[in-house]
Image: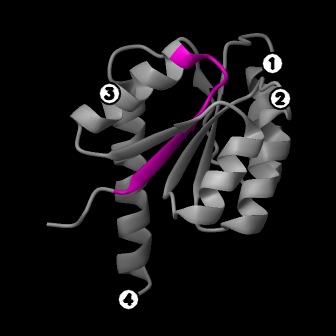
Amino acid sequence: MTEAPAILIVDDEKIIRKAYCLELKAAGYDAAAAASAAEALSLLAQKKFAIVYVDFTLPDMDGILLCRRIKECVPLSEVVIMSGRVDARQQLREECIAAGGYPEILQKPLQGTELTDLSKRIQQEHQASRTGMGL
């Protein structure tokens, strides 16, 4: 059995970070959290995270810029933007893709096991792409 990937949650709201980490840990993932872009970049310099969930609105940097920075430092990490802005979802999706992020924007607040379900799907996509490349 393969080890569950490490996942980083980047959100300035403590209750959100805690709830999302608890959900992921309950599903067997190695989950960590950061309250800011600076903290996230520091953690990414210390540990490899397969998936990084980033809130679009952070106090020190917007989520799209953080996505770009993450992809520059850790190109194999999958970056997923989360946002409570319903009105700009398509625009955020396009900006996220242009920055190298995952082509799906998670609408906050998340419902049920949405975070765990997407994490499993991303993990399966990565395993399938590695298998397809003969790795």
Between the residue at mark 4 and the residue at mark 1, the CA separation in whole angstroms equals: 39 Å
Q: Position of residue 79 (x, y in %)?
A: 62, 48
Instruction: Give the residue type at disc 3.
Output: Glu
Give the magenta part as a residue range: 5-14
Give coordinates of residue 58: x percent, y percent. 77, 26
Check the picture and name the quadrant holding the N terminus. Answer: bottom left
Q: Secondary structure at mark 2?
A: helix
- The numbered dot on residue 91 is 2
Instruction: Report the amino acid beneath label 2.
Output: Gln
Q: Earlier in the sequence, mark 3 or mark 2?
A: 3
Which image quadrant for residue 61?
top right
Tell me the CA gap for discs 1 and 3: 27 Å
Q: In terms of secondary structure, where does tag 1 sit?
A: loop
Looking at this rendering, what residue extends furthest in the left direction?
A: 1
| Placement of the C terminus among the 4 image quadrants | bottom left
Q: Which of the two labelled residues, at mark 3 and mark 4, occupies the earlier sequence position? A: 3
Q: Residue at x 61, y 16 (%)?
A: 13
Q: CA distance from mark 2 to mark 4?
A: 35 Å
Q: Residues within 10 Å of mark 3 (few under 14, many from 20)?
A: some
Is disc 4 placed on a helix, strand or loop? loop
Q: Residue at x 56, y 18 (%)?
A: 14
